[in-house]
Image: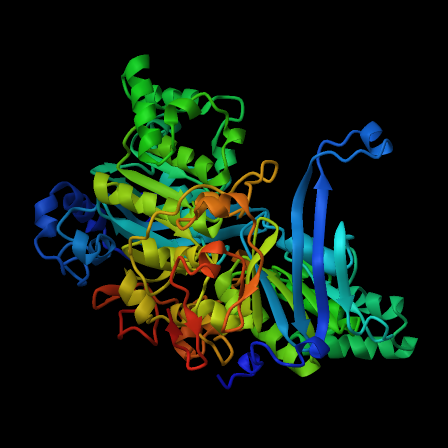
Amino acid sequence: MSAAGPSQGANPAPPGGSAAAQAASVGAHQFAAGPSQGANPAPPGGSAAAQAAGVGAQHASEAPLLRVDGLRVEIPTRRGVLLALDDISFAIAPGEILGFVGESGAGKSLTGMAVLGLLDPPGRIAAGEVWLGGRRIDQLAPREMRRVRGKEIGAVFQDPLMSLNPLLQIGEQLIETIQTHLAVDQREATERALGLMRAVGIPAPEARFTAYPHQFSGGMRQRIVIALALCAEPRLVVADEPTTALDVSIQAQVLQLLRQLCREQRTAMLLVTHDMGVIAETADRVAVMYAGRIVEIGAVEDVIQAPVHPYTRGLMGAIPTLDETVGPLAQIDGAMPRLNARPEGCAFHPRCPDAIARCREQGPRLVAQGPRQVACWVAGPPQEVAQ
Amino acid sequence: MSAPRNAAAPVAPNAASAASLTVNAVARHFPVGRGFLRGALGRTGPSIKAVDDVSFRIRRGETFSLVGESGCGKSTLARVIAGLDAPTAGTIHFADAASAEHRIQMIFQDPYASLNPRYRIGSAIAEPIRFLKLLPREAVLPRVHELLRHVGLAPADAAKFPHEFSGGQRQRVSIARALAGNPTFLVCDEPTSSLDVSVQAQILNLLRNLQRELGLTCLFISHNLSVINYVSHDVGVMYFGRLVEVAPTRVLFEAPKHPYTQLLLAALPRLDTRGRDRPPIMGEIPSPLDPPRGCAFHPRCPHANARCGEERPELAVEADGSQVACHAVSERRIPVPIHRSDGVAHG
């Protein structure tokens, strides 16, 4: 089913797309030859794949570690099939942090779950591909995917208590995870676990080793979850609202920790958050999502300082700052459409101040605009009609 | 400084007379592990001091905000002020308390939980009007329609149920219901925390406009400093059940004095400071069952000395009108920025 995906429906990538993409991820140097290549449309052999692989400037010299291509997630219901994610394409290089930001229901968490292979049934990947390194992972059997998760992809979720077993000492949980994924004996696993606890900034790890999750504060628990996610030295970490449940002073510590890990261990990270401030401080690039699609993706500085898509612009204006604000906050009237009431054309058009007739009829696709990509008929340059 | 919300002088000479609410040494302690026999014998066991010795004033028509991290006691204080809970000690005095017009209404964080799912929202909004017998029966429905328009909804929405609305619209319904009681005083407890940022902007704009139009006095609770900055005239920073700094909004944000306030502001992720390295923040929030002696912040404070561990600091007034409870500030052990009205802070 997913092989048929790209040429079907919303993603008109030529059949060569996936092959080209595969070549790109295997032959790293070929692809990396020109940093701008990823951003420019139409290298021969499938523009969608190449665009999807476009990683940030400082990471452009490497092949992407994770590449998602034309991902489409559907949720069948009694009243029809809901389209939860539509034509999601992006790539993350080793050591790079790509942030996903958007309102609740925009599909940012779902994107992370789809990468992890943890979609709740009946949700399913209906089209598109997920590549980790040179390997396609969206079609793996559950058993194999379990081995990928934890070993190659670590996960950090919002609520640390949900990720920890309340009946096991945290030392046991760390050792169990380490021994599941690495062939090490008890002593070495213990040493590793202590080292991890030290690395994530838990003071006196020897003394805390036999403590249970409830004996830790929220910030410390989230550090343990991060330590668990890092047990097998994964190449990618999916962090879904990792600091949302934490107070601001603790959030700062955890964000700094995550950033430091990515920098030092070259771990790539997919960071999902609703907080643009967290993105600004932590991520290298950001993908702004709206109603199941990426509407703008680019370097954090670019997107925050000069947002192009009308939704991103509205979002940035709506965020209160610490400066003196005399006038009202910019407001985007209305609310994001529900999955079962998605308007025709661009999903944002009913709330968009710049909408033209075309926006009501056709959904725009992501198109490169300088180093970033934007899906908008008005803000973006003229583009080919999809389908 | 011409913005209306900043117009109030930090310490007006007639501040006391203009005060709508005076909170004096209010405390709310919760006993822990008290058995029924111990209660019967009148013995006092250990207690959690959720709110302790808090005093502040809110001037008529202004918004006073309480900010702090989870567990600092800000919501407990809000409930005590709204009359939903009784203080263990101290007094809460509303200047208008004797007036028949004096009414307090509250807006809660979660609009899903605070609206009855089986009430049409027209009935929910009409309830306070009927209960307080504010209007004759035939005038209730027109008033409900007027309120709905006031908060940006349509009169036709009165026939809908809460589940037919989005989160932001539901919070608008909560606001309409609060306004239905013709309040003179509004307590907003994290009214936008469960909303998305674009919807939050709608609600914040609405609250600010309504306050100006109706001359409401507000107590606003939030953990979000940017939201606080947008809505408040004055801000009180709470830590561990106590106010550690109280200041006019601009003074607080441009010349924060208490080390905890400075920590909060430094820790806030901002749009303009990408990838900066921050000074490491020390320690964890202490356990309320085992509160530190002296200043509750001293175990995490980079400026703490022996005195901070022994003696609890009291709020003291600084030259720019802010009140700070910190030995390091009062002794000038650390540089203390003093706010001037031209917006420049001087250390």
Total labels drawn:
0
Residue A256 seen in the current view: yes
For this orientation, the residue located farthest to the bottom is B2
Is B21 positioned to the left or the right of A2 in the image? right
Is A159 positioned to the left or the right of B44 in the image? left
Q: Which color scheme is applied? A: rainbow
Foreground of the two, A15 or B28: B28
* Residue B103, picture quadrant: bottom right
The residue depicted at 69 percent of the width and 68 percent of the height is B175
* Residue B345, picture quadrant: bottom left
Residue B99, x across and y down, in percent: 85, 75
A272 in relation to B330, above or below: above
Is A54 positioned to the left or the right of A379 in the image? left
Residue B324, x across and y down, in percent: 53, 61
Residue A374 seen in the current view: no
The residue depicted at 66 percent of the width and 45 percent of the height is B49
Residue A198, x across and y down, in percent: 33, 31
The residue depicted at 75 percent of the width and 67 percent of the height is B177
Foreground of the two, A295 or B170: B170
Foreground of the two, B25 or B328: B328
Is A25 positioned to the left or the right of B292 in the image? left
* Residue B26, picture quadrant: bottom right
Quarter of the figure with the C terminus of chain B: bottom left
Residue A363, x across and y down, in percent: 39, 66
The residue depicted at 64 percent of the width and 75 percent of the height is B62
A203 in relation to B200, above or below: above
